[in-house]
């Protein structure tokens, strides 16, 4: 390194360069990191244009260098490692592919056909419970029947649809997220209920 200014802290830095670098290497555990920090310290001294004298210039320069090292280490800690980046790239995509979408649409059309085979009240109870997520008591009130009969009609509707689809269960107790397919099916069934 050559000094643009040969006075003040820059001069002290150049005179004690080897000693300061050795101290930093011991403290940081890396000669490469110490060298980089020394370079940044020199640049900071040049940028600030400091020609002022400091009583304990060694301690002052060492503190500047340690602060620069801390800043570098914090910045590096925020960066992702190569392994972390590769792990993020390898995250599987949970979105359905075109084949799955086509299969789901076909299954919805089949389910729609099967549900049209149900008696109207049973189909309406199934739609109210599963598509509208209506409580059983409210369904019973709407149809003027008991909650027990609502539960029986719902169970029979589900069993019928599951049997026709060759499945052991058709519906789960958790609500299903809204999807375009589900919305189309709900609109078609709502239209059929009005007819």
Image (cartoon, rainbow, N blue to C red):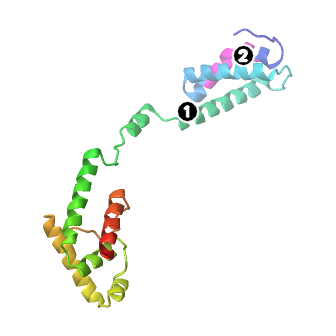
Pick the quarter of the image with the C terminus: bottom left
- Is residue 14 part of the magenta span, yes or no? yes
Q: Residue at x 66, y 19 (%)?
A: 39
Mark 1, residues whose alpha carbon is within 10 Å: few (<14), some, or many (≥20)? few
Residue farthest toward the top in the current orientation of the protein: 2
Mark 2, residues whose alpha carbon is within 10 Å: few (<14), some, or many (≥20)? few
Quadrant of the rendered image containing residue 35:
top right
- Tell me residue 132's x, y (percent): 37, 73
Q: In the visual, does 56 lie left or right of 39? A: right
Q: In the visual, does 4 lie left or right of 164? A: right
Please name whichever residue, 4 or 97, is drawn nearer the observer in this view of the structure: 97
- Tell me residue 37's x, y (percent): 64, 23
Q: In the visual, does 57 lie left or right of 107? A: right
The residue that mark 1 highlights is: 76
Please name whichever residue, 167 or 34, is drawn nearer the observer in this view of the structure: 167
The residue that mark 2 highlights is: 16
Residue 7 higher or lower than 155, as above or below? above
- Tell me residue 130's x, y (percent): 31, 72
Q: Which mark is residue 102?
A: none
Q: Label 2's element? A: loop
Q: Residue at x 34, y 48 (%)?
A: 95
Classified by dominant secondary structure, the portion drawn in magenta counts as helix
Q: Label 1's element? A: helix
Residue 131 higher or lower than 9, as above or below? below
First along the sequence among labels 2 and 1? 2
- Is residue 107 part of the magenta span, yes or no? no
- Tell me residue 93's x, y (percent): 35, 44
Start-end of magenta stretch:
13-24
Between label 2 and label 1, give the one nearer the viewer.
1
Q: Are marks 2 and 1 in contact (CB under 8 Å)?
A: no
């Amino acid at each position: 390194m050559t000094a643009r200014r040969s006075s003040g802290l820059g001069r002290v830095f150049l005179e004690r360069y080897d000693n300061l670098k050795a101290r930093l290497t011991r403290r940081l555990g890396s000669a490469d990191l110490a060298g980089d920090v020394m370079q940044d310290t020199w640049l900071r001294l040049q940028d600030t244009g400091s020609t002022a004298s400091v009583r304990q210039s060694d301690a002052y320069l060492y503190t500047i260098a340690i602060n620069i090292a801390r800043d570098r280490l914090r910045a590096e800690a925020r960066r992702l490692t190569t392994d972390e980046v590769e792990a993020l790239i390898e995250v599987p995509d949970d979105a359905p592919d075109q084949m799955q979408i086509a299969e789901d649409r076909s299954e919805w059309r089949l389910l729609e056909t099967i549900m049209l085979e149900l008696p109207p009240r049973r189909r309406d109870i199934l739609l109210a419970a599963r598509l509208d997520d209506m409580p059983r008591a409210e369904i019973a009130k709407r149809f003027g029947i008991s909650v027990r009969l609502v539960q029986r009609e719902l169970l029979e509707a589900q069993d019928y649809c599951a049997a026709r689809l060759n499945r052991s269960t058709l519906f789960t107790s958790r609500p299903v997220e809204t999807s375009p397919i589900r919305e189309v099916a709900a609109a078609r069934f709502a239209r059929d209920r009005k007819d």
